[in-house]
Amino acid sequence: MNFQDIDFAAKRPLPGWLLPSLALVLVTLSWGLYRYVALEQASAALKSQAVSQRQVLLRQSEVPVSAAPELPKERVKAINEAIVSLNTPWPALLGGIESARLGDVALTRVEPRPKDQSVLVTAQADDMGALLDFMQRMSSTPPFVRARPVRQELVVEGGMPRKQATFEADWEDRP
């Protein structure tokens, strides 16, 4: 018995676009594979370079480092005083002074003394009672713990006499 290819439909040739499409896909895949291999090689080179740089740094760190020269005591003291001065709690101090001050008291000077944790406050008012009330309110307003008068005087400005007082108030650091 003889078997033959029995097909009732005519065979169609392959479309003309199929071969160029396959060639394009093959070229694209080979280009992607080439770029992948190149990137892997570059990554390996960078890793080996980083390892060698680490080894160089480790060898350099094994070299003994000489101690820093000792600073003179005067300079150390000046640095510490500057740090204390920079750590003055300005927002708390000014907030406490302003909350203790009433409208009839005018502030003329605020001089912090961070080393002693105190502040000199000079204020003016029409009568001494208002200034003393201000001092008492300030001594009970945080961050201040006590206030004491330092100087009282009569100031004449523009023909108007006003009372002026200087108070020293101690503050307390609160975290």
Image (spheres, rainbow, N blue to C red):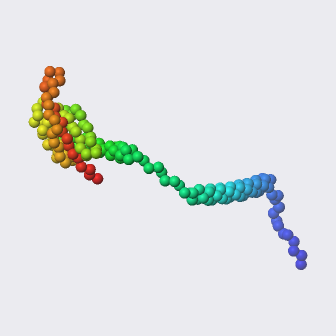
Q: Position of residue 83 (x, y in %)?
A: 35, 45
Q: Looking at the image, is 26 positioned above or below residue 115?
A: below
Q: Position of residue 158 (x, y in %)?
A: 17, 21
- Toward the right, the furthest residue is 2
Q: Looking at the image, is 26 positioned above or below residue 2?
A: above
Q: Position of residue 129 (x, y in %)?
A: 10, 36
Residue 39 visible somewhere in the drawing: no
Q: Looking at the image, is 139 positioned above or below residue 22?
A: above
Residue at (48%, 51%) from the top-left corner?
68
- Toward the top, the furthest residue is 159
Residue at (84%, 69%) from the top-left corner?
6
Q: Residue 110 appears in which quarter of the rendering?
A: top left
Task: Give the mark count.
Answer: 0
Q: Looking at the image, is 48 positioned above or below residue 122?
A: below
Q: Position of residue 118 (x, y in %)?
A: 24, 44
Q: Residue 45 appears in which quarter of the rendering?
A: bottom right
Residue 27 visible somewhere in the drawing: yes
Quarter of the picture containing the N terminus is bottom right
Residue at (49%, 53%) from the top-left corner?
67
Which of the pair 93/47 is nearer the observer? 93
Residue at (57%, 57%) from the top-left corner?
63
Which of the pair 1/169 is nearer the observer? 169
Left or right side of 70 for 135: left
Q: Residue 15 appears in which quarter of the rendering?
A: bottom right
